[in-house]
Image (cartoon, rainbow, N blue to C red):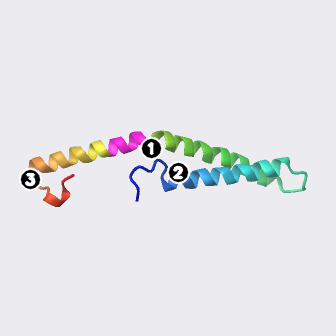
Amino acid sequence: MRKDCVVSNAQKALLVSAAAALLIGIGVSMSRADLPSAWTVALSVGAILLGLFLISLLLHEPAAEFDKEERSKRTVGMEASGKVQDSQRI
């Protein structure tokens, strides 16, 4: 797995789902066919999924930094107590 990948699989799934739901919702809203109005919910679902994608994209880097920082703190603490093995060192 590549370490320099910016978008995770969960973010890709959110983006694809949002795009699909938005396209379905827009298609149903603009069509003149006699479709059940419940299909227009797809437009709202697409907007919500797009918002979740944007939030996850915005918070991806700070969360990764926080995880790295906490991992290094834990490793330093384990080294101080002598509980870390050579294979666990970063």
Tag 2 secondary structure? helix
Residue assigned mark 3 = 82
Query: Which amino acid, by three-letter code, is at mark 3?
Result: Gly
**Residue 33 at x, y percent in the picture:** 90, 55
Find the magenta span and give its range.
Answer: 60-67
Residue at coordinates 59% horizontally, 42% vertically from top-left?
A: 51
The answer to whether the residues at label 1 and label 2 have Cβ atoms under 8 Å apart is yes
**Mark pair 3, 2: CA separation:** 39 Å
**Residue 54 at x, y percent in the picture:** 55, 41
> Which of the 4 image quarters holds residue 70?
top left
**Mark pair 1, 2: CA separation:** 9 Å
> Which of the 4 image quarters holds residue 72?
top left
Residue at coordinates 61% horizontally, 48% vertically from top-left?
A: 49
> Which of the 4 image quarters holds residue 20?
bottom right
Tag 1 secondary structure? helix
Q: Earlier in the sequence, mark 1 or mark 2?
A: 2
Residue assigned mark 2 = 11
